[in-house]
Image: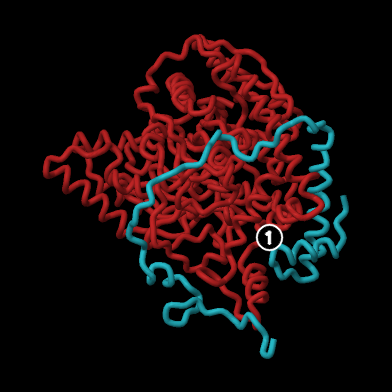
Chain colours: A cyan, B red
Amino acid sequence: MALSQDDVRHVATLARLALDDAETARFGRQLSRILDYIQTLNELDTSQIEPTAHVVPMANVWRDDEVEPSPGREAVLGNAPDRTDEFFRVPKIIAEGG
Amino acid sequence: MSKESGMGKPTGQALHELTLHEMHDGITRRAFSAAEVMRAIYDRIAAVEPKVRAYVTLTRERAEAAAARADRERQAGATLPPLAGLPIAIKDNLCTKGVATTCASKILTGFVPPYNATVVDRLERLGMAMVGKTNMDEFAMGSSTENSSVTVTKNPWDTTRIPGGSSGGSAAAVAAGCAAAALGSDTGGSIRQPAALCGLVGLKPTYGRVSRYGLIAFASSLDQIGPLTKDVTDSALLLQAIAGLDRRDSTSASVDVPDYRAALRQPVAGLRLGVPKEYFVEGMDPEVEQAVREAIRVYEKMGLTVKEISLPHTRYAVATYYLVATAEASSNLARYDGVKYGYRTARASTLAELYARSRAEGFGPEVKRRIMLGTYALSAGYYNAYYQKAQQVRTLLRRDFDAAFADVDVIVTPTTPTPAFRIGEKADDPLQMYLSDIFTISVNLAGIPALSMPCGLTRAGLPVGLQLLGKPFDESTLLRTAYAYEQETEWHKKRAVVK
């Protein structure tokens, strides 16, 4: 299962990873090899097998909707790499005139 | 291989070599104080930590305050929990209020959690003293602790070798005497494998037994927190302290927590031990196989019934794991975007660039590789072929264990195919590194509990681990089976000589 450079670039875009050309080439090789190994799963006929998403049988967990104190704004904003007053600060999302 | 090999010395009087329960006994007899134990631990850290590099953060003031508080309260006549004032190391993926928590990743540089993980809260409420935060493979992705962005941790038994991973810092800290015990996390073997390679007892509880609240997520359906300790009694003590339902983790199980220490003394004769033939394969180190076979003979002599069993889908576990775990990781790690906490790139003029560059600069190569693999497995057109297929094989792996446990009470295997390998030996070959987890991974996919304990030393003086696998929520049987072996052998008394 060989991944092309375009495949790798597409996945990197989905994963929001800005890879350089060397990384793209290296991941292409390494992921192809790992995917080859993963093909061994195709030896198994699983057409009649239910998938397992979670090992513990579990239904919804409910609790009373009670108001409790929150950690407070400073506790949350204190780790921000950039902020303005009580806001997280990020670059422009919409281009000028956009 | 023999007990008289001269490698490792038995527990002497040095305070840093004692187990938690030995420390507690000494403090209760007033042979020494918790403050003296803490001083011995930090003296030991000063002496060997430059060679071992188990920690990423030390919290000496906080630890000494907790030890002093325990001494003060005992002086005043209070009867304290057995863990009060005792030194524990915490893996750096467990949130600690006011203390940096980074998963050994650049992307969490400077992150100081505003809250404690539930397990940390529980230990602190019992008066335990956190010595520091331990090194790990970045985001717990790895088997050698070489994937840390901070430093490479060395195996205290041989500092040219890896301590295992991803909880390699936790294992190395305890094995080197730089903490009495530690907490780690186990997604595919990350407690048991380093425990095996560092000569410790490492327990991965049943999925849901211990709250994951405040454990920074890698693969949410596989992650579980557990103790790394010098013996089985300490493992029982720590499991007792951290187990149980937590309303902050909706996947924590509403299952009664038994008295684990009392369970240790229950008789084991008559228990049925299963030996899966798929775990004794070509390529296994002969000294590892010999030590494990010898341990099985010890069990036979104690009156346990030993029978060969089959777990037929074992050879598919690694492939299944590297789809399930990476898919979950690619989703869990989407939250690191350079906006709310942690590392942010200096080179971004748009929000999209901010995300992509912060992540590219903040994550190390193994984390990126797994995010890529997981994203690919979940992407349009491949979901059925990869992710769903892996979930179906996961069902087959679970059924293997269900069928086996109809006939046996405990399954026994080697924890790893080889003893600790050399630093750098597998660093450039991700697939070879993944295959080193071959004996530990099925357990996480099936959600069952498992424990690794020391069962020998190779001629080169490297520890060998024996793995015991149990039925869901039956940690009691695992612990008492392990304890019975410990009573017959001396391996748990061996201590690393750091050179």
Residue B455, x across and y down, in percent: 54, 27
- Secondary structure of residue under mark 1: helix
Residue A63, x across and y down, in percent: 40, 45
Up-down relation of residue B405 to residue B496 (above or below): above
Nearer to me, B384 or B169: B384
Residue sitting at the far front:
A65
Up-down relation of residue B342 to residue B369 (above or below): below
Query: Which residue position is annotated with label 1?
Result: B368
Direction from residue B102 to residue B318 in the image, left or right:
right
At x 61%, y 54%, the residue is B146
The quarter of the displayed image where residue A49 is located:
top right
Up-down relation of residue B62 to residue B384 (above or below): below
At x 78%, y 45%, the residue is B384
Few, some or many residues within 10 Å of mark 1 (<14, 14–19, 20+): many
Q: Please state the chain letter of the residue tagged with numbered disc 1 in the rendered image.
A: B
Direction from residue A83 to residue B329 in the image, left or right:
right
Inspect the image, locate mark 1, and give the three-letter code of the amino acid beneath it: Lys
Nearer to me, B422 or B140: B140
Residue B405, x across and y down, in percent: 59, 19
The quarter of the displayed image where residue A18 is located:
bottom right
At x 62%, y 26%, the residue is B413
Q: Is residue B178 visible?
A: no
Nearer to me, B33 or B392: B392
User: What is the number of callouts on the image?
Assistant: 1
